[in-house]
Amino acid sequence: MILLNQKEQDIASKIKKLKDEAGTHSPSIFTIAEKIPELNIQVDACFLSNPYATELFFTYLKRDLVDSRKMRDVLEFYPSQNSVIAEILSECLNVNSKNIFIGNGAIEIIQAVIHNFTKKKIIVNIPTFSSYYEFVKEGTEIIFNKLEKDENYRLNVQKYLEVVKREKPDTIVIINPNNPDGGYVKYTDIKFLLANLTEVETVIIDESFIHFAYEDETYEMKSATELVKDYPNLIVIKSMSKDFGIAGVRAGYAIMDSKRVAYLLKNGFLWNSGGLAEYFFRLYVQNSFLHEYEKVRIQYIQETQDFFKELNNIPNIQLYPGMANFGLVELKDGSSSTDFVSKLLISHGIYTRNCADKIGLDGQFVRIASRNKEENALIINSIKMCFE
Amino acid sequence: MILLNQKEQDIASKIKKLKDEAGTHSPSIFTIAEKIPELNIQVDACFLSNPYATELFFTYLKRDLVDSRKMRDVLEFYPSQNSVIAEILSECLNVNSKNIFIGNGAIEIIQAVIHNFTKKKIIVNIPTFSSYYEFVKEGTEIIFNKLEKDENYRLNVQKYLEVVKREKPDTIVIINPNNPDGGYVKYTDIKFLLANLTEVETVIIDESFIHFAYEDETYEMKSATELVKDYPNLIVIKSMSKDFGIAGVRAGYAIMDSKRVAYLLKNGFLWNSGGLAEYFFRLYVQNSFLHEYEKVRIQYIQETQDFFKELNNIPNIQLYPGMANFGLVELKDGSSSTDFVSKLLISHGIYTRNCADKIGLDGQFVRIASRNKEENALIINSIKMCFE
């Protein structure tokens, strides 16, 4: 069982204080590094991104903006309006631009959608990404649909359908793959749910981690994006921070009924992209970039699966099977997740996500991101050492 | 009188189409350049910024992020949360961090404030920046307080006080200096209004152009920021896009009662800054940067005043006196502002703001930004040639 010495306890209490100040999200690695300079942070395994995609993005950024000195153009002037960027994405996503809403990160879209379209009752599966219930307005009833531990926190499609039919919410949320457990709902099941839930006014499918999921060895991703045509109640939300590893750029989009896009644009999201987000979206639709991205996407999926196998082999912890780029592990030796996360950060410089504040998880849970191959090896070794 | 030939008319109709698509804002220079490649744009005199401050910012950006290869740190990871960036600004603004709200550009703050704090009735002085009435929710009454042409669109403080006392709104908005006329309200008058309007629930003072205003030859700026301590109904909104010329970075802040900041943070603006906005705010509070900025701020004010004198000397137009970094000019020879703006763009590559859509302006008005010395000379010569 992991125990902290006095010095470690002192630092751990500083970490706790920062965490308390950050609410239900983790404090950023910059905040931690600044406020606790005695820490020697090696790996941010709290940060859920494909590092190879980040490298690819920076190769292009260097060529397009730094070497050619065009950075100033991108940062000095006003970026394009929301609808202009939507047009850029339209062909690549095979969706009419009037159905595309651009966000200053997916978090802005989650807030906008919940604030504007959720009315009286929302069903949120737990465990979940906390914003989905935190942003709910006062007076709206939140039904927590508890995913079962003995079903590995997978969404049981048939049971879920029954819950929704019984509760009659106006909004439901499916994160696919789910955060923090990685649980994946297959494309056929998504279609089955949509076909049977046309009476639900707003069906949110958050696909922020869909680039890491696959159903067979072609690694093809199965997005619900194009289903918005058939189901006007569907809203697909997509963060670009995870698959491209560019959280500081703040880029996300959503696909939804055109009337909803028009409504949001009328209510203050006309100009919400930074210059670099616009640059990213223009890059994202280029075939040459997408072709190279596809290679690092598959490489990262494969390495992530290897990482999961290694995590699975460590005694004292249990890995829950998922399709995202992080592993949800449960500590089985009686250690608290808080002590484990503190120890891993203080003694090994590895920052992981303590899930102690996640409702719907019964036990001591930690979420660990897959990073690059070397970092993953470091994470595995450090966890093993923690238990020695 | 300015008349367009057939070719110019064809391009002008394309410009009009883009403008119609962009609503009550101007299409960005990138959108125009992309959609009308036959244009040879030389000067963006629609864009309201200090170009010397932009240069200064890029000198620092190059040193801090490009040369030292730290750009990746800023763009890969999540930027700090709103309240962390507020803490960074606190000392420099001499305001408690709990009174500071960070925005993804001032436009996001305007929307958030109007949506969340305006209730039944708002008074907006016209002409104005259109977002202040566009973002008002359905059911809220908008009273347009018309600034008088024969008073040069200056706010008549005594008359304004009477209007507010009579109308009893819950929200009033003063843009200082005002957009699009540059009308400036002196600090003593702002204090007088605040002292006499404590019954108004929300007093918005938008100081996005305050860095360009001055009351005497010391060029000291007189911000209402510190008055929030004494007047909890006051909200000061500040864009950083104008004074620093970094619209693509998306950075703004507001000072307001701490309960209001807490309320907004609880409702979805926890994480709204991009990595470069956080970099900018960290730079902004450094004494060495501020010292250099102060020099280019004053240089730019002086050149802007020279530009105004030149504008004033052009026959056929009348310049309205203002304290911002743009001149509001009225065409006096019977030309339409649409033809003037088209001619200036098509024949001289100078993009200015047609004010035909600005409510509260009675006549043919164009807003022309002050740029650097060379560009200002080009603007002056081009306008003269338009009238030849």
Image (tube, coloured by chain):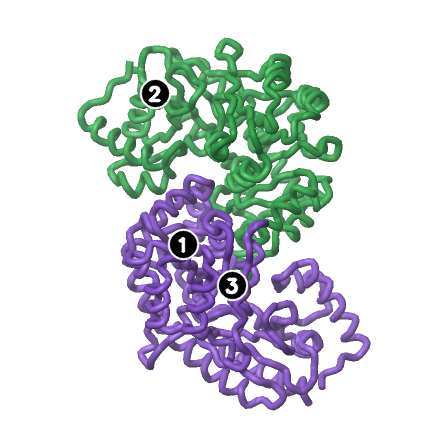
Chain colours: A green, B purple
Q: Is residue A299 visible?
A: no
**Do the residues at discs 3 and 1 belong to one chain?**
yes
Which chain contains the residue that carries disc 3?
Answer: B
Q: Disc 2 vs disc 1: which is toward the camera?
A: 1
Q: Looking at the figure, which quarter contains the C terminus of chain A? A: top left
Residue B320 x %, y %:
52, 81
Q: Residues within 10 Å of mark 2 (few under 14, many from 20)?
A: many
The type of residue carrying mark 3 is Val
Which residue is situated farthest in the front direction here? Answer: B166
Vertical comparison of B362 with B253: above or below: below
User: How far apart are labels 2 and 1 at the CA level?
Assistant: 47 Å
Which residue is situated farthest in the left direction here? Answer: A6
Residue A357 x %, y %:
38, 25
What residue is drawn where x is 63% and y is 34%?
A236
The type of residue carrying mark 2 is Ser
What residue is drawn where x is 61% and y is 62%?
B25
Q: Nearer the viewer, residue B151 or A332?
A: B151
Which chain contains the residue that carries disc 1?
Answer: B
Query: Can you tell which quarter of the image residue B231 is in?
Result: bottom left
User: How far apart are labels 3 and 1 at the CA level?
Assistant: 15 Å
- Name the element at disc 1: loop
Cβ atoms under marks 2 and 1 closer than 8 Å: no
- Name the element at disc 2: helix
- Name the element at disc 3: strand
Vertical comparison of B272 with A135: above or below: below
First in sequence: mark 3 vs mark 1: 3
Q: Disc 2 vs disc 3: which is toward the camera?
A: 3
Which residue is label 1 attached to?
B201
Q: Residues within 10 Å of mark 3 (few under 14, many from 20)?
A: many
* Residue B124: mark in rendering: 3
Which chain contains the residue that carries disc 2?
Answer: A
Which residue is label 2 attached to?
A337
